[in-house]
Image (tube, rainbow, N blue to C red):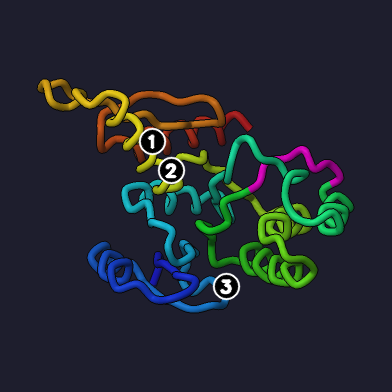
Amino acid sequence: MKQGILLIGDSDAAVAGKAKSQRLGYQAGDDYEIPFSKTLIVKSGVRVPWDLLPAAWSFLDRWDAAVPLWKYGVIAADVGTEAERELTQGIVRDLRVLLFFHEMLFIRQNLAGVEFLDTWETERARGSDDRLSFLRAYYLNKPLLCVLPISWSADVRAMDASRMRAKHPRIGKMGKRKMSRVEIAPGRSVKCNPGDEARVLAYYQEQGSRRR
């Protein structure tokens, strides 16, 4: 199958059902692999951003992998043990870099994708912090990585919407159309009509790739 989801951890009937309804492959397990041509590897408990999947699959036509940033205010120097930070610095050189939300990894079934996962497995065995090991694997392999905004985490988007409703409880009750905000780069976002988020983000990602 061309596209599908690998759920790391306990199987989830809801995710499996949703994947089936979208004609996606589905597999659950504990081993990181790439069972589909374009695979979303997601950990149990992390909500799948179903509305953004079409954009993610299109990104994998150009990139080997795509992953959201984890937190804008936390860098590699802030996590892990001193020993693992030293190990990571030996590879990355500078720990003043952002970390990735590896719990949601879109990856292509090609040599670069397979080698990256193999390296990540090796690096996980060398330390205890998955974010630092993911960073080391990235710097060691250098796959073509599409870095996605933190807003790709469905949990983050849901919390932002909840905060907005709490702050402005009358929004949406006076017949006014609510606008969605799409983060297209760290600290930069645009507004669009609800339902157009994936299309708008895909447009800006395409523009960014052309400028490289």
- Under tag 3, what secondary structure? loop
Dot 1 amino acid type: Asp
| Residue 140 coordinates in the image, percent (x, y) | 78, 57
Indicate which disc, 1 or 3, sits on the residue closer to the N terminus. Answer: 3
Q: Which residue is mark 2?
A: 156
**Relative height, residue 84 to residue 176 (above, below):** below
Q: Can you give x and y, in whole percent of width and height, for residue 180 in the image?
A: 31, 30
Mark 3 and mark 2: Cα distance apart in space: 24 Å
Circles 2 and 1 in contact, beta carbons < 8 Å: yes
Classify the position of the N terminus by image quarter: bottom left
Q: Which residues are magenta?
A: 93-99
Q: Nearer the viewer, residue 181 or 71?
A: 71
Q: Position of residue 25 (x, y in %)?
A: 36, 71
Q: Nearer the viewer, residue 3 or 191?
A: 191
Query: Tag 2 or tag 3, which sits nearer the N-term?
Result: 3
Q: Amino acid at mark 2?
A: Val
Query: Dot 1 corresponds to which residue?
Result: 160
Inspect the magenta stretch and tell me whether residue 98 lies in it.
Answer: yes
> Which disc is residue 32 wearing?
3
Give the percent coordinates (x, y) of residue 31.
57, 77
Quadrant where the C terminus is found in the figure:
top right
Q: Which mark is residue 28?
A: none
Task: Answer whether labels 3 and 2 touch (C-beta < 8 Å).
Answer: no
